[in-house]
Image (cartoon, grey):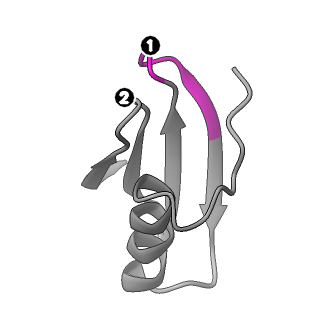
């Protein structure tokens, strides 16, 4: 598992983009740095996954809704 990039929201929540065994994942954390959700992307490019994380951090999209 390799950390590739990190994105931060104004409310303190964050997202980490990781490379894991040939695919990418985003780990979403709440404002208390508690891991809330992991989403795997097995058919997406790194650019696509980073765009998803960045859009979430900029609140362009609300998905995923972090409930922890």
What residue sits 44% from the left and 13% below the top?
32
Disc number for residue 65: none
Q: Nearer the viewer, residue 48 or 25?
A: 48
Determine the residue located farthest toward the top in the rendered image.
32
Q: Are marks 2 and 1 in contact (CB under 8 Å)?
A: yes
Q: Nearer the viewer, residue 17 or 63?
A: 63
| Residue 2 in magenta stretch | no
Q: Position of residue 13 (x, y in %)?
A: 43, 32
What residue sits 45% from the left and 21% below the top?
31
Q: Mark 2 highlights which residue? A: 12
Q: Nearer the viewer, residue 61 or 3?
A: 61
Which corner quadrant of the image does residue 18 belong to?
A: bottom left
What residue sits 35% from the left and 39% below the top?
10
What residue sits 62% from the left and 44% below the top?
38
Q: Position of residue 61 (x, y in %)?
A: 60, 65
Left or right of residue 12: residue 45: right
Q: Quadrant of the C terminus?
A: top right
Q: Mark 1 highlights which residue? A: 32
């Amino acid at each position: 598992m390799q950390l590739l990039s990190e994105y931060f929201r104004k409310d303190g929540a964050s997202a980490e983009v990781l490379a894991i065994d040939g695919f990418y994942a985003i780990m979403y954390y709440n404002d208390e740095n508690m891991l809330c959700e992991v989403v795997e992307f097995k058919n997406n490019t790194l650019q696509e996954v980073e765009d998803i994380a960045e859009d979430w951090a900029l609140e362009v999209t609300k998905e995923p809704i972090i409930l922890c």
